[in-house]
Amino acid sequence: MLKKIPDTLVIVFSILVIMALLTWIIPPGRFDRMASGDRTDLVVPGSYHATDAQPQGLWALMCAPFRGFAEAAHIIAFVLLAGGAFSVVMGTGAIDAGLARLIRMTASGRRARSLLLVLIMVLFSLCGFTFGMSEESLVFVLITIPLARNMGYDAIVGVAIPFVNSGVGGAAAAYNPFGVGVAMEIAGLPFPSGVGLRTLAWLMLTAISIAFIMVYARRVEKDPSKSLMAGLTSVVSGTFEAGHFTPARLVVVLLFLATLVIIPFGAARWDWGVMEIGAAFLALGFLSGAVARISPDAFVRLFSDGARGMIPAALVICISRSVLIMARDGQVIDTILFYLAGSLEGLPKSLSVQLMFFVQGIINFFVPSGSGQAAITMPLMAPLADLLGLTRQSAVMAFQLAAGFFDLVIPTSFVTMGVLSVSGVPYNRWLKWIWKLILLWVVFACAFLAVTAELETWW
């Protein structure tokens, strides 16, 4: 047992070093790419070929973080600017006052408190199901952690409320245009399609996740010593400085709720990405500051403090992205993909689709981006599904379930490591909490994929 838990940044940088070493061990190779529609990085099936060795040395290792920063600049900007904007919103005291009143309203009994928590988790899962909410969790934990702790729970519950539920919503998403939409386009399927089965999977997975979180939350509520965060202090404050709920604060809360409504609408209707969603948060910060009559100097101070608090998460995102760059430059991703995909041929349909799910899970470690993983795997997995007698819907479902589940736990995911960094939840304690839930999801995925593979007309 380690006496001291390594910092998140230490973990991701260690993975970067390991990836650099792997480029000296794994034979290099690549698939040819082709353009189709808006994408130029689609893999050409059957085009894999060996390439000259591209081992990544010490100089490449030192350059990788800078390149990671450049490639993830839009995410880092989102984290810093949205974090600053949220600091202004919190500085108005409106959220504290509103949540304090909400806590008082549910203080009459555990049932009311539990119902409130369940409703919030369903909303976050719906965000994942509709527009693929992911990076936004980096900001929402700043509110859900204080909410959870004031309800008698801990920071892990606070992280799980937006992060786990939006993730599991995305795992069964029917309307997410980023990961699932890209995968369906590449597979030659209409988007959206298979909505009925995906909705069924979403309902069941959301129920499993909420039940798991609530069981843990009630255990912590009854005995705080059973919390996996016992002995640790969350980076995010767990107390509300609740003042009077003034008309100005009511307006700020209404602006906040309006932002939560317009974000999924914008993502679904106007194809909003991280930049536009970040702009909505930034506008929320400016409007909240104006309504609360915060002076320019106080606004700058609050904004700077919020952005400064997000710097560790920004660094984690930067290094996590550089892991992908190292693997890509060393030309080992396609080699791994080639051998994993080849291992599926000649197997029964139910077993093939289950193994396809695990293969996608392994690839997710190296390519944690949903749309990126779809781009490099679906050109291979879609025709492979044809050869194995599977529907292409099964191949897409195997991809999205694996990407949705394992992205919540892999240390190469900048969202996962960023959320943990922001919340102060150590990675090893997060693993200790979530592994049983991951196991439940995997069992469900294997059963769901096997049944739907054998009953093709379901799709």
Image (tube, rainbow, N blue to C red):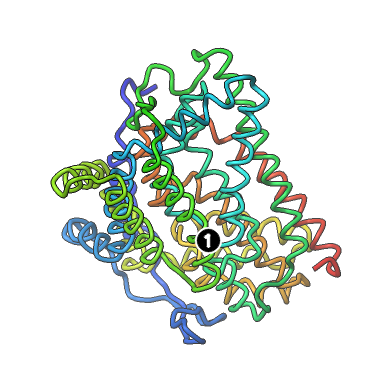
- Residue with the most extreme front position: 247
Location of residue 190 (image quadrant): bottom right
Seen at 86% across and 64% down, the residue is 455
Q: Is residue 194 visible?
A: yes
Location of residue 25 (image quadrant): bottom left
Seen at 69% across and 46% down, the residue is 205
Residue 343 lies, in percent from the top left, at 63, 63
Residue at the spot of label 1:
264
* Side of 88 relative to 231 (left or right): left
* Side of 89 relative to 296 (left or right): right
Q: How busy is the neighbourhood of tag 1: few (under 14 within 10 Å), some, or many (20 plus)?
A: many
Question: Image height check: is 2 above or below 423?
Answer: above
Q: Nearer the viewer, residue 449 or 356?
A: 449
Q: Nearer the viewer, residue 404 or 327?
A: 404
Q: Is residue 348 visible?
A: no
Seen at 64% across and 57% down, the residue is 357
Seen at 68% across and 78% down, the residue is 189
Helix, strand or loop under label 1? helix
Residue 453 lies, in percent from the top left, at 79, 63
Number of callouts:
1
Q: Quadrant of the C terminus?
A: bottom right
Residue 355 lies, in percent from the top left, at 67, 57
Q: Nearer the viewer, residue 285 or 133?
A: 285
* Side of 206 relative to 89 (left or right): right
- What amino acid is at disc 1? Pro
Residue 298 lies, in percent from the top left, at 17, 43
Q: Quadrant of the N terminus?
A: top left
Question: Image height check: is 180 above or below 211?
Answer: below
